[in-house]
Amino acid sequence: MLKPLTSPRIPVALFSRAKHTGYYSMERVLEAVHKSLPPHIDGRIVVSPTHAQGFWRRLWCATYVATKRSLVNHITGDISFAALALPGNRTILTVHDFDRLYSLTGLRAALFRLIYFELPFRRSRLITAISPQIAREIEQLFPWAKPKTVVIPDCLPAGFRRIPKDFCCECPTVLQIGTKPNKNLESLVPALQGLSCELHVVGPLSEKQRSILRDSGIRYRNSVDLSETDLLKAYGEADIVSFVSTYEGFGLPILEANAIGRPVLTSDLPPMSEVAGQAACLANPDDIESIRQGLIRITTDREYRSWLVEKGYENAARYSADEIARQFAVWYETIAAEHLCDPQPRFEPI
């Protein structure tokens, strides 16, 4: 049953995964977009009541999402299966990456593909990819979904601004964001051996990683589950930000470092190379010597380092929350208009 809207605002439910400990870029991007939506978009963040693990928890999540649906529904990531509980012609699904799908094999991979991607993609009115690389992967994996896929990138989270710092040539602090296998800490550590530096790793370390760090002789420190304030502080204290990941959906630390004013070393693979543009030193993430030479160049070449910082400021400005929110708002308006043949009066679900 529908009732007339009492105002011209378009109600949108923004569905988010349950809170995770550690470095949660997805939630910070969502918050920035939500705060930057134009006044006529009545966005409401709805957080899943449980982590998406096991059949019953996923069922609970989908049931909860169904009770919170709105005129326009946007699943912002990680709980894509919940699209099956929403009206498909009014649902947007954002895809961040396929990392977990690639890590599975056999029946588990087939089921995960079906529940997290195949069926939700068919159900949704629109699929948004956070980078051209993810859009290409969608086309490769699900060619039929290409016509309903658009690229809307991540935005720079709130609070990231210029923090001036004199570069410490004698012993620069290298900031590493993330410790999952794709973050490639195991290649960064040997690349740093013999260089005068301190490594600051953000993220929980495995016993294997701790052993590698101890054996390397590198000065390092480790931080876990940082608050936004402490994360900003970590960027501010860094001299170089390293992000030589082997696989990403986007690469948000690149933009965060750009905005703060720190030179970035990242992978020469998309989407990192696409997100960075000219605002990073690119290295082969599978080549320890390539990583090492990138770090040496940033450390020793002052003009190059300054050039990277200036290009970083320009690059970060391309991904403002206002611009990304505007792109989403256009689609919210489009879907609302499709659902309401006569835009006056508008309707919302009871």
Image: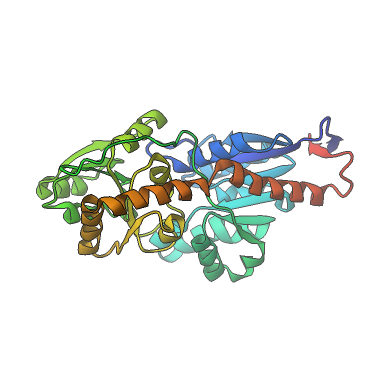
- Position in image of residue 298 (x %, y %): 26, 53
- Position in image of residue 178 (x %, y %): 33, 46
Q: Is residue 223 left or right of residue 124?
A: left
In the depicted structure, whether residue 222 falls above or below residue 211: above
Residue, x 57% and y 67% (percent of image)?
142
Q: In the picture, which quadrant includes the N terminus?
A: top right
Q: Is residue 321 visible?
A: yes
Rendered image quadrant of residue 39? top right
- Position in image of residue 5 (x %, y %): 83, 33
Rendered image quadrant of residue 32? top right
Q: Is residue 254 visible?
A: no
Residue, x 50% and y 35% (percent of image)?
158
- Position in image of residue 69 (x %, y %): 69, 39
Q: Is residue 255 left or right of residue 238?
A: right
Q: Nearer the viewer, residue 23 or 19?
A: 23
Q: In the picture, which quadrant includes the C terminus?
A: top right
Residue, x 46% and y 45% (percent of image)?
53
Q: Nearer the viewer, residue 35 or 57?
A: 35
Q: Nearer the viewer, residue 199 or 349?
A: 199
Q: Nearer the viewer, residue 223 or 305?
A: 305
